[in-house]
């Protein structure tokens, strides 16, 4: 009897749970391009193209291996438009006796998947997604009844469990975390390496035509399109990162530089999340470089912490806390997303750079997401749901399991401190220290009042004052509140008026 094996667009690996015991002589693999998944938020055209191209290449690889693949293209006239309807159609088409799929990356899809059995009229098995280094059950056990779920303690546990960067029972080098050595400002004279850029083959070119026609009106530039879309190319791109960028990854992890979107970052998030790269293999490869003496410990540890620590931790939080997690708004932020988030047209050079680059590349590195767009969203009090929908749409690596905890928790503090112990609010001073953006800005980063003052400065104090009732008791915010006390009420009132005048200039999308 035929078993229908469903593989979603972000599950593109031969070892995915749904394919594990596939019977070549009887089973069919279903992969479907569907409008509903491409439009539930208006994804960046580069993101849709990346995924469709990766899906088509993955289907070809399975066929080469001798598997029967039923690949439904978006422009197939019979395409029913949603994953559920495509599963129902495929069950009927193949006379499947049951369906096997893998746990998805979004609550919304899981909720839908739970209805597939009734819709298709055959049993549907949802297998655990074991591409992660910490299962949902293991994370729940770690969380137990801990009062605080801090990444640092989770990360140490993961280092021990996976024997990464360990010397016996102790962390390599004697310290668990070299974060303090990951904060150098951008170097003036050093030219960053470039990631591997792949020329689209015929399969990818056909996808680009399709996406141009169907989603060309979404935010973002489709071309030039250079993302690797196969496992082999993603691995080659990662090797290039290891050779050219990893040695300085640690030093410049938090740096930002005009016209340099990727600096010493790996640009591997889109491949990890879609299944083209394996997280443990990357961590082991990077540890190997350190053990061979080719990269310093602050680079290897800094990189491994992102994947073994942050990536697993945010997924754990997502599945532990959803669906209620998405609905909280601890700071009662209620300002609509300004129109310039969809155009990049603003005099604030830092935001123009981060948003402009996002529009061109469907990519921004962590500190741009956290401390430029993220910081602005936090201190301007933008509505969490609108900010989250933006981040989910615009980045090629965005899926809700990873986007939501980062935006809702880490950036907006909308979860009231489940993920981070304090909001990462900052004035313009942080951006000036970690980037060269302020040099080319029409605003003066050292001024807080007056027509040329950097808006981040007044917004920062407005944020602190507006949220005083909720935040003053936070021990990690003792210093800013002490500074505020020294400023006196008149200066605070002037800063708040300055912030108010700036906020009044923001227009939501019409
Ligand atoms: P590198 O800097 O080279 O890091 C290597 C890898 O570490 C990344 O590819 C990623 O897999 C992992 N990583 C690093 N930081 C995090 C983190 N905070 N959470 C989870 N994984 C991490 N990452 C996504 O994969 N998808 C998202 O939708 C996403 N949204 C974000 C939104 C905000 C507001 C913030 C602050 C961070 C977000 N991140 C997201 C995390 C991080 O910014 C990206 O993973 C990273 O910028 C991707 O670029 P890279 O591959 O060059 O990463
Ligand atoms: C993001 C995405 C897009 C744009 N298109 C598809 C698609 O056509 N078919 C598909 O199976 N998956 C797609 N995806 C990924 C799904 O939305 C993804 O599986 C969920 O976001 C859960 O992680
Ligand atoms: Fe951004 Fe202010 Fe610097 Fe301009 S001066 S780039 S607005 S931080």
Image (cartoon, grey):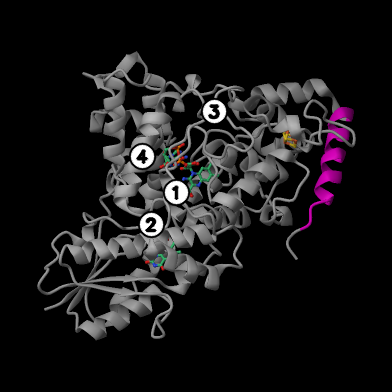
Horizontally, residue 361 falls left or right of residue 309, namely right
- The residue at the point 51 percent across, 36 percent down is 420
Q: Is residue 109 visible?
A: yes
- The residue at the point 40 percent across, 41 percent down is 311
Horizontally, residue 375 falls left or right of residue 266, namely right
Distance between the alpha carbons at the discs numbered 1 and 2: 9 Å
Is the residue at mark 1 in contact range of ligand 1, meaning its CB lies under 8 Å from it? yes
SS state under label 2: loop
Q: Which is more N-terminal, label 3 or label 1?
A: 3
Asked if the residue under mark 4 is in contact with the one under mark 2, i.e. CB atoms within 8 Å, the reply is no
* Label disc, if present, on residue 402 of the rendered structure: 1
Q: Which is more N-terminal, label 4 or label 2?
A: 2
For label 4, the residue is 238
For label 2, the residue is 105
**Of residues 438 and 128, which is closer to you in this image?**
438
Q: Which is more N-terminal, label 2 or label 1?
A: 2
Task: Residue at the far top: name it.
Answer: 174
Q: Which is more N-terminal, label 4 or label 1?
A: 4
Q: In which quarter of the view is residue 489 placed?
A: top right
SS state under label 4: helix
Distance between the alpha carbons at the discs numbered 4 and 3: 19 Å
**Image spot of residue 70 (x, y percent):** 26, 75
The quadrant of the picture occupied by the C terminus is bottom right
Distance between the alpha carbons at the discs numbered 3 and 2: 37 Å
Q: Which is more N-terminal, label 3 or label 4?
A: 3
Image vertical order of residue 372 relative to residue 302, above or below? below
Magenta stretch: helix, strand or loop mostly: helix
Asked if the residue under mark 2 is in contact with the one under mark 1, i.e. CB atoms within 8 Å, the reply is yes
């Amino acid at each position: 009897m035929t078993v229908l094996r469903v593989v979603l667009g972000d599950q593109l690996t031969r070892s995915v749970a749904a394919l594990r015991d596939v019977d070549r002589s009887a089973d069919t693999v279903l992969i479907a391009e569907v409008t509903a998944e491409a439009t539930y938020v208006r994804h960046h055209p580069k993101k849709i193209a990346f995924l469709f191209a990766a899906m088509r290449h993955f289907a070809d690889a399975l066929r080469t291996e001798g598997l029967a693949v039923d690949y439904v293209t978006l422009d197939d006239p019979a395409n029913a438009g949603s994953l559920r309807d495509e599963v129902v159609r495929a069950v009927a088409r193949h006379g499947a006796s049951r369906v096997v799929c893998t746990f998805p990356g979004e609550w919304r899809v899981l909720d839908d998947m739970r209805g597939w059995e009734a819709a298709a009229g055959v049993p549907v098995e949802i297998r655990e997604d074991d591409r992660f280094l910490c299962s949902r059950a293991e994370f729940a056990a770690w969380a137990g009844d801990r009062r605080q779920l801090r990444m640092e303690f989770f990360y140490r546990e993961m280092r021990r469990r996976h024997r990464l960067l360990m010397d016996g029972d102790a962390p390599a080098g004697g310290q668990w975390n070299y974060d303090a050595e990951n904060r150098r400002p951008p170097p003036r004279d050093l030219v960053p390496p470039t990631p591997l850029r792949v020329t689209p083959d015929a399969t990818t070119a056909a996808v680009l035509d399709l996406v141009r026609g169907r989603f060309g009106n979404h935010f973002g530039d489709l071309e030039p399109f250079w993302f690797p879309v196969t496992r082999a190319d993603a691995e080659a791109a990662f090797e290039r990162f290891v050779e050219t960028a990893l040695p300085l990854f640690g030093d410049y992890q938090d740096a930002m530089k005009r016209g340099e979107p990727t600096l010493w970052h790996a640009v591997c998030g889109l491949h990890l999340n879609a299944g083209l790269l394996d997280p443990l293999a990357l961590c082991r490869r990077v540890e190997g470089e350190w053990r061979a003496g080719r990269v310093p410990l602050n680079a290897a540890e800094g990189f491994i912490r992102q994947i073994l620590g942050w990536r697993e931790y945010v997924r754990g939080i997502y599945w532990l806390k959803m669906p209620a997690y998405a609905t909280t708004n601890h700071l009662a932020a209620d300002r609509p997303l300004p129109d310039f988030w969809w155009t990049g047209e603003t005099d604030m050079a830092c935001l123009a750079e981060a948003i402009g680059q996002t529009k061109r590349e469907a990519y921004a590195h962590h500190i741009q997401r956290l401390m430029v767009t993220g910081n602005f969203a936090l201190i301007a009090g933008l509505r969490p749901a609108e900010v989250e929908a933006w981040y989910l749409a615009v980045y090629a690596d965005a899926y809700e399991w990873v986007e939501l905890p980062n935006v809702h928790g880490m950036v907006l503090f909308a979860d009231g401190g489940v993920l981070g112990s304090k909001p990462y609010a900052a004035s313009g001073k942080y951006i000036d220290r970690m980037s060269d953006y302020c040099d080319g800005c029409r605003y003066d980063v050292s001024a807080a009042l007056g027509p040329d003052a950097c808006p981040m400065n007044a917004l920062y104090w407005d944020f602190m004052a507006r949220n005083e009732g909720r935040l003053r008791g936070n021990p990690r915010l003792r210093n800013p509140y002490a500074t505020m006390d020294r400023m006196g009420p008149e200066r605070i009132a002037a800063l708040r008026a300055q912030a108010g005048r700036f906020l009044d200039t923001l227009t939501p999308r019409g």
